[in-house]
Image: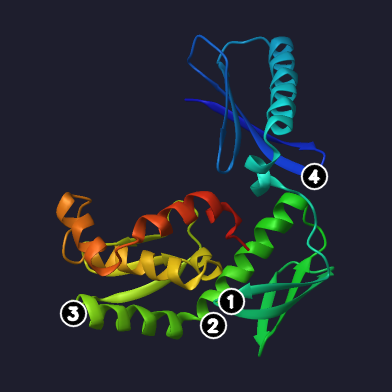
Amino acid sequence: MANKSQTLFEFDQYAIPLSIIKEWRGSVRISIAKTGAFLRLPKLMPSGLVRMEIEKSKEWLRDTILKDPNAFSRFSNARYPDVFYKTVYDQQFEITITRENRKTNTGKIRGNKIELKISNDLNPFQEKDVIQKLQSRLFGKFFSDSFTERVSKINDLSFQKSFKSVNLKYNKSNWGSCSSKTNLNFSTRLLLAPEDVRDYVIVHELAHLVEMNHSRKFWDLVSSVMPKYKQKEKWLKVHGASCDF
């Protein structure tokens, strides 16, 4: 069984969780994933060498960030300002953050104003995670009906297929999915994309109600509904990382 511990690597405006994993292996490996960095070490490595490898991994992270800072934007520890503005589902919102001596984190939407109240005990990485998830939950609920109506409209126009539900969730691994039970799931991050890109993802998932695969038939179906769908895919690849709360 592997032994695991975690520390926080901070450099410039970045805060990256660094997991140190000691397991049965013969070499040292450092890697970056969506949730942080992972340093894998031989299980029986002496503590002195462990400390040395941790320092080497931090140097590697520093050099990697300097080579491509944009690739690490998700680990930015720059604090959110007390008041900022965000366009979501083509509407602009004023978001106010209040940091208080409290244990819970809450948020409310009133019209086009959002008030978030968060604990002042959070480190930069924790604070960013909390604020992102609060925004996702609030916007997902706020736009649930409108988004479902859009899915239904596109379905009625182009597919005429029945589905069980439409769900908005804070998913960073994909933009949408269609389950075997015909539940259509979409990432709340899609609310930050342009309308034509949102429509493409909706078309993509609705097409799975016909073809539950990515076969030639599937792509021909997508193309018949949205001939320029490849432009939308390209937009997501180039700009998708910027669609986050």
**Would you name the residue on which mark 2 appears?**
142
Name the kind of residue labelled 1 in the image: Leu
Q: Is 105 situated above or below 53? A: below
User: Residue 51 appears in which quarter of the rendering?
Assistant: top right
**Would you name the residue on which mark 3 appears?**
160
Where residue 176 appears, x then y in whole percent? 38, 61
Instruction: Measure the C-alpha gap from mark 1 to mark 3.
Output: 30 Å
| Image side of residue 80 versus residue 37, left or right | right
Q: Quadrant of the C terminus?
A: bottom right
Where residue 75 appears, x then y in whole percent? 68, 45
Where residue 183 appears, x then y in whole percent? 29, 69
Q: Residue at x 30, y 66 (%)?
A: 226
Q: Marks 4 and 1: in contact by CB < 8 Å? A: no
Q: Residue at x 43, y 79 (%)?
A: 147
> What residue occupies the far bottom of the structure in this picture?
111
Nearer the viewer's eye, disc 2 or disc 3?
3
Nearer the viewer's eye, disc 4 or disc 3?
3
**Would you name the residue on which mark 4 appears?**
13
Instruction: Measure the C-alpha gap from mark 2 to mark 3.
Output: 26 Å
For marks 1 and 3 on the same chain, the one whose residue lies earlier in the sequence: 1
Q: Marks 2 and 1: in contact by CB < 8 Å? A: yes
User: Residue 100 appears in which quarter of the rendering?
Assistant: bottom right
